[in-house]
Image (tube, rainbow, N blue to C red):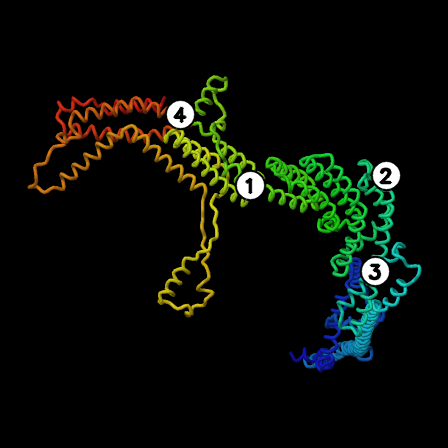
Amino acid sequence: MATAMERKGPASMHLSHGTRPVAVSTGYKFATTWEQNAPLTEQQLGAIATLAQSAADRPLPSHVVALAQRSQRPSVLPVDREAETPAIDASQGGSLLSEQVELNSQHHFYEWYTDLESATKSETEEKYRRYVDTLTGHLQICDDILAHLDGSLARFDDLQAHHQAVATKTKSLHEVCERLVVEKERLIEFADALRTKLNYFDELENISTQFHAPTTSVGSGHCLPLLKRLDECISYVENNPQYTDSSVYLVKFKRLQIVALEMIRAYVLNVLRNASSLVQASVKENSTQDGSGRIAIAEGAETLVLYVRFKAAANDLKTLIPEIEKRASQNRYSEFLTSLTSLYCEQRLAVAQGVISSRIAEYAKRERLPSLTRSGFAYLSQVCQSEHQLFEHFFPMSSSDPLNLTPLLDPLCTTLYDTLRARFIHEANLDLLFELVDILKGEVLDDKLERRRETVAGLRPTILKTLADMQERLTFRAQTYMRDVIANYIPSADDLDYPARLERLATAAVGSEEEGRDSYLTWYPPLGKTLSCLSKLYRCLEPPTFTSLAQDAINMCSTSIQRSSKLIERRASQMDAQLFLIKHLLTLREQIAPYEIDFSVTHKELDFTHLLDHVRRVLRGRASLWSSQSLARTFSPRVMDNQTDAKKELEKNLKVTCEQFIMLVTKITIEPLLSFITKVTAVKASIRSRPVDAEVRKPLKEQAFATPDKLAEMIAAVEKVVKLHVPDIVSKMGLYLQNSSTRSILFRLIKSNILEAHGQVLALLYSDYTAAEASQVPIMKQSDLQSFLDGLCSS
């Protein structure tokens, strides 16, 4: 271990003092970094391996070989080859080997060996020391290089720091420049916006100058752009009242707008007047005047003269007026557009009114009232359609509103209205009034107006006005007709000749080929007239008006029938009068059933009955005239609602008449039976009311009116009447009542009364009489009587 430590010598000591760790570690790091940053390719690695193999077989240097040859001599001890490899100093190593030493003893050998070993060791260490010195120099060079590299890296770091500082400053400069550019753009935009806003105020003088320029006119095409720019300025100033002097500018702008609109209005009026003058001149050329001074123009030339030429003459307005209509949402332009439509209607009315009045007067001369109504409204329908088309040509956006043409169409349509009203207001013929209302409702309103709804909408008010007047006239004449013809009808002898009148009609129907005769021939004349009038009024009048008239007509007709039935009772019999009344009341009820109206009418009435009671209390001193209640409240009448229903009243009268007829027939056929049953009931009631110890009660068969002989006589008489008179009654019912179901209902009640009375008598006969006594009474069986009556009903 000591030898090994000694072999290390100064070099080891030198490396252990800090040079080796710094240099070697730095060199290692440098080599490693170098290898990582500059790797060798496969070809370069192969070349290095080839060089390493060639260097391994390299021979010793020439001076080492020469030195070995000079010092080589025979020796007792073998020479180590390793000692030959390093370069040995000739002054030291050569002297020990070249000396001839005599080794006399072991001691001398050991001394010689020790010296030789020391010399060899010194020579070997010298070689390594030189090598160590060489390495130390190299390490020092490497350390210097590393120091230089550290300095270079430090300078590079400084350079990088300076570069970073420059980059930061450059970036800050760029940001500042960008902010300046953005600020510049913002200022430019602000300047542009400010210039844009100021332009609206600056336009006042420019627009005013151009409007007042002598070369500026509405027809030149420069007016509309100026008007559009003026509208934009007004809108901007109105929306920005916060600007200085905005109210002043707004007043000036609006004043300038009024001037511009007045220029346009004057231009439109001038164009319309020129067009009207041209059309009127053309009308005079193509027309003739009749005796009354009216202008008559040929029907074929009317459209060409009144509409085509006017459209061509006023064609300059085709582009101007739509621009005004686009601005109609503004109040100023809406009013201005209304004034333009009024001007248009005035000029058109001046052109067309004379021609249209002449045409209607021509129709009125040669046609009857129904034909005049048809042709007049047909002509006005064409006029309205043509006027609407012409108006749509100049006012395309305003044509959808029919009210815009009202100032024009109302005077034109009033001409026909005045002509018609002057004639139908004096018309007394009810059928002609029915026809006129049918024409207006069916042909004019439902046909023409529905097919040309928008184009002839201006004609609707005149039609409705005419229809209302006709319906009013019709209502008045219907009331007069009901009063004169129905309520005040005076029947003739033939009208009251019942049942002979029905027998004659029945005989005529049997003798003819038509078995089913018309039932209205058998009606009482007021009934037929009432139903005919109601059927026509139902189509012509409004439901409230018709309800009131129907109420009056039904009441009048029912009263007239009842009055006639009393006259028939005097002339014929009570049964004929009742059957007459049943027949006509039943017919009236059946004929008014299809009308979908409410026949109830509520009337307002004033009730003064409470005033009478109050006056009585005042006169008797029970109340004071100056009570706490006000006089107005005390003496004010009460409003009472009085509801009447003509249909219910009719049914009530019919029911009462049917009950009277049933009781009449029952009384005629079985009156003795009814009297007998009444007497029996009275006798039995008196017997039950007597006390027990009273006089011995007499049996029913011992009563004077109920002896078997009296009962047999009575039954024979009743059965004779039933067999003889009931078929006549059924035949008479068939003569008055053609409906078999109605006859069955009435006769079923009569049959029920007869069978009930017959059954009661038969029960008394079996209960209060002996078999021998009952056999003396010729009474029919209940089943036989029922079969007989059923046969009469089915025949």
Q: Earlier in the sequence, mark 4 or mark 2?
A: 2
Q: Is residue 598 above or below residue 234?
A: above
Q: Which residue is the extreme one toward the right?
A: 215
Amino acid type, callout 4: Gly
Q: CA distance from mark 4 to mark 3?
A: 88 Å
What residue sits 70% from the left and 40% below the top? 377
Label 3 vs label 2: CA separation?
36 Å
Question: Residue 688, how many percent across, how many down?
Answer: 14, 40
On the image, the x and y values in percent for residue 435 come to 62, 36
Q: Quadrant of the N terminus?
A: bottom right
Circle 4 crowding by C-alpha within 10 Å: few under 14, some 14–19, many from 20: some
Where residue 286 is drawn, which disc sits there?
A: 2
Q: Residue at x 83, y 40 (%)?
A: 289
Q: Point out the tag, 1 or 2, that comes first from the N-terminus.
A: 2
Which sits in the foreground, 529 or 748? Answer: 529
Q: From the image, state whether disc 3 or disc 1 is nearer to you.
A: 1
> Quick check: marks 4 and 2 in contact, CB under 8 Å?
no
Label 3: few (<14), some (14–19) or many (≥20) C-alpha neighbours in 10 Å: few
**Nearer the observer, 309 or 499:** 499
Residue type of the residue flagged with mark 2: Asn
- Sort mark 1 into few (<14), some (14-19) or many (20+) by Cα contacts within 10 Å: some
The dot on residue 480 is 1
**Distance of label 3 from label 1 (alpha carbons):** 60 Å
Kind of residue indicated by mark 1? Thr
Q: Which residue is label 4 attached to?
A: 734
Give the CA distance from mark 4 to mark 1: 36 Å
For label 3, the residue is 262
